């Protein structure tokens, strides 16, 4: 059975009201994206009403769990760019994803992908750095967050960096070859501007 007893009744009602993966994504989309170097639990993100990529994925995994899905994530690893953590779910043998991102295209995926590799590749064209380089290179095996139940990952007030550290340690699988990576072209201006629509940026201090 799902171990969701750490949430209080009001938190459970709010999470259950999201109902399904698409409802969870809509809730994440309504949350402002923040740029602080934090690792909040789902409870803290719910309280603060803001999240970044990593926190959004962990929040989504907890919300999936409350609504009857396994709390699964995987990691997309990039070159000369930041990684992207994504909550994943399966419907009728096909994979979908929920994500919080500062870039337009790196968010929700409908459950139409036959494998995790297919799902990861769906992010390739829209995953780029500010040099306009397509940067996605590998994806990890799925991680069931119930392995961290003993650390109260859903409700702790302490940072949950232990999940991020675990993602660095696990096996990742290549999406493209070295020669393919060397032949990639930079993103065109229109696609770059579309991908950055609504992007949050830190205020310059220098």
Image (spheres, rainbow, N blue to C red):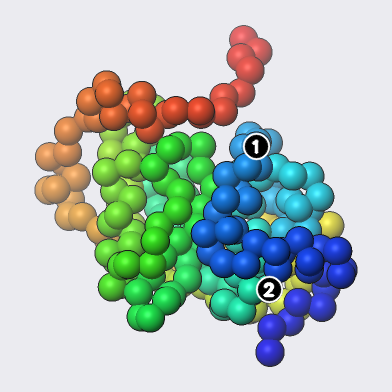
Name the residue at 17% across, 55% down.
177
**Rendering coords of residue 18 (x, y %):** 65, 62
Disc 1 from disc 2: Cα separation: 23 Å
Q: Is residue 155 visible?
A: no
| Among the 4 quarters of the image, the one containing residue 51 | top right
Identify residue for label 2: 66
Of callouts 1 and 2, which one flags the residue occurring earlier in the amino acid sequence? 1
State whether residue 46 is above or below residue 91. Answer: above
Residue 117's x, y, as percent? Answer: 29, 66
Instruction: Give the percent coordinates (x, y) of residue 150.
Output: 75, 78
Report which residue position mark 1 lands on: 32
Image disc number at residue 206: none
Of residues 113 and 72, the one nearer the viewer is 113
Q: Is residue 88 left or right of residue 43?
A: left
Q: Residue at x 62, y 37 (%)?
A: 33
Q: Callout 1: 10 Å neighbours few (<14), some, many (20+)?
A: some
Quadrant the N terminus occupies: bottom right
Q: Where residue 193 appears, x then y in whole percent?
A: 36, 24
Q: Secondary structure at mark 1?
A: loop
Res 35 visible: yes
Q: Residue at x 57, y 50 (%)?
A: 26
């Amino acid at each position: 059975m799902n171990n969701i007893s750490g949430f209080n009744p009001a938190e459970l009602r709010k999470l259950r009201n999201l109902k399904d993966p698409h409802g969870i994504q809509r809730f994440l989309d309504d949350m402002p994206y923040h740029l602080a170097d934090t690792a909040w639990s789902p409870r803290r993100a719910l309280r603060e009403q803001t999240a970044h990529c990593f926190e959004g994925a962990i929040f989504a995994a907890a919300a999936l769990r409350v609504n009857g899905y396994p709390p699964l994530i995987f990691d997309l690893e990039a070159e000369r760019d930041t990684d992207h953590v994504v909550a994943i779910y399966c419907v009728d043998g096909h994979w979908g994803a929920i994500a919080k991102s500062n870039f337009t295209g790196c968010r929700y995926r409908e459950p139409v992908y036959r494998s995790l590799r297919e799902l990861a590749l769906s992010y390739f064209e829209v995953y780029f750095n500010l040099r306009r380089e397509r940067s996605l290179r590998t994806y990890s095996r799925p991680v069931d967050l119930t392995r961290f139940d003993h650390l109260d990952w859903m409700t702790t007030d302490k940072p949950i960096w232990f999940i991020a550290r675990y993602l660095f340690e696990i096996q990742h699988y290549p999406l493209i070859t070295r020669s393919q990576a060397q032949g990639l072209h930079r993103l065109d201006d229109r696609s770059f501007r579309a991908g950055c629509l609504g992007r949050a940026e830190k205020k310059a201090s220098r």
